[in-house]
């Protein structure tokens, strides 16, 4: 681990990142060039003391998890993230074909959507980042670990996951999710890929999934951008879900909106008062 080089690199990336890039106000009295250390620490979800010691070349050797958090906080590109890992003496994350590092462009857009339910998913339907209103609408989907990180996995193994959609909509969602997973399976090359591992486990755990997988439905289209969300306090919300994909279709930014003047629009205004949606409701 090259502590001095690592510290200098982090400092340079922090100073190059402007408050506007991460959705923070600049403020009239700001004198710091770029972001403050405590702002980067907050974006990375770690203590300011921990991050500060690393940037001052006197901290501990960060784990791969901490390095990934710092890379997300500093909105590093894939090349910059890999460089960060190498300087820290860690192997750079492999190109898994589904991605676990939100592209800086999508992250900057998400940072500006603090008044809108929005989330970034990868090719296994793992939520990598959410706005607070997305957590209020759908629950904190970034809190899951292991295989449960995939919404598709939870959909076919945990009945509580299905409560987010009205009962009559669930059969079509099941078909759509299997079709989407098959597309990821094909893109990642099948055998040995993360998608293949997910398929293998779901075939063992869910008869419903196994039946839909054998049907070989591919490229199923959603009838529209409309999506009905069932909320424990607000009831069913008729929303529109817009998707923005990165060039490789590895990631998708989903934004949930409602037509002004509708009942759903009025309900969305109540989300900030409700807090994070409890798990299983």
Image (cartoon, helix red, strand yellow):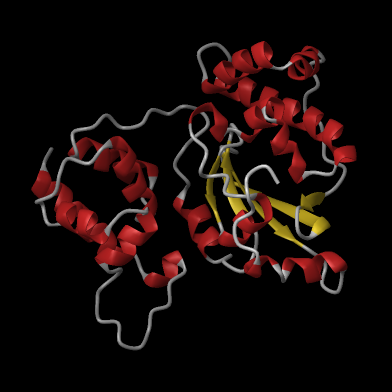
Splitting the image into 4 quarters, where does residue 191 fall? top right
How far across and down, in percent of the image, does residue 262 sit?
87, 69
Q: Residue at x 52, y 22 (%)?
A: 194
Residue 280 vertical position relative to residue 111 in the rendered view, above or below: above
Residue 225 vertical position relative to residue 233 in the rendered view, above or below: above
Residue 178 relative to residue 111: left or right: right
Q: Quadrant of the N terminus?
A: top left
Residue 132 relative to residue 137: left or right: left
How far across and down, in percent of the image, does residue 281 sit?
71, 46
How many marks the image carries: the answer is 0
Q: Residue at x 38, y 28 (%)?
A: 94
Q: Residue at x 63, y 68 (%)?
A: 272
Residue 126 relative to residue 175: left or right: left
How far across and down, in percent of the image, does residue 175 sit?
81, 28
**Residue that lies at the very extreme toward the right in this rendered image:** 168
Splitting the image into 4 quarters, where does residue 266 fall? bottom right
Residue 134 relative to residue 72: left or right: right
Q: Nearer the viewer, residue 202 or 95?
A: 202
How far across and down, in percent of the image, does residue 84 sit?
25, 43
Q: Residue at x 58, y 16 (%)?
A: 196
Splitting the image into 4 quarters, where does residue 240 fall? bottom right
Q: Nearer the viewer, residue 228 or 257?
A: 228
């Amino acid at each position: 681990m090259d502590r001095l080089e690592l510290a200098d690199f982090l400092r340079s990336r922090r100073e190059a990142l402007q408050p506007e890039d991460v959705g923070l106000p600049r403020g009239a009295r700001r004198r710091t060039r770029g972001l403050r250390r405590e702002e980067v620490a907050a974006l990375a979800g770690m203590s300011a003391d921990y991050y500060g010691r690393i940037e001052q070349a006197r901290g501990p050797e960060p784990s791969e998890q901490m390095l990934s958090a710092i890379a997300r906080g500093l909105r590093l590109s894939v090349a910059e993230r890999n460089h960060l890992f190498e300087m820290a003496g860690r192997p750079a994350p492999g190109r898994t074909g589904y991605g676990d590092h939100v592209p800086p462009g999508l992250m900057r857009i998400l940072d500006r959507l603090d008044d809108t339910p929005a989330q970034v998913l990868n090719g296994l339907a793992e939520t990598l980042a959410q706005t607070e209103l997305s957590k209020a609408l759908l629950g904190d989907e970034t809190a899951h670990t292991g295989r449960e990180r995939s919404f598709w996995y939870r959909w076919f193994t945990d009945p509580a996951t299905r409560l987010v959609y009205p009962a009559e909509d669930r059969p079509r969602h099941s078909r759509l999710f299997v079709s989407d997973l098959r597309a990821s399976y094909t893109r990642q090359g099948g055998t040995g890929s993360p998608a293949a591992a997910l398929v293998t486990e779901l075939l063992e755990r869910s008869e419903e999934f196994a039946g839909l997988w054998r049907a070989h439905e591919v490229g199923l289209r959603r009838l529209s951008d409309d999506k009905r969300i069932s909320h424990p306090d607000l009831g069913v919300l008729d929303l529109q879900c817009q998707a923005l994909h990165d060039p490789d279709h590895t990631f998708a930014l989903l934004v949930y909106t409602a037509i002004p003047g509708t009942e759903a629009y009025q309900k969305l205004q109540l989300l900030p008062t409700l807090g994070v949606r409890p798990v299983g409701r």
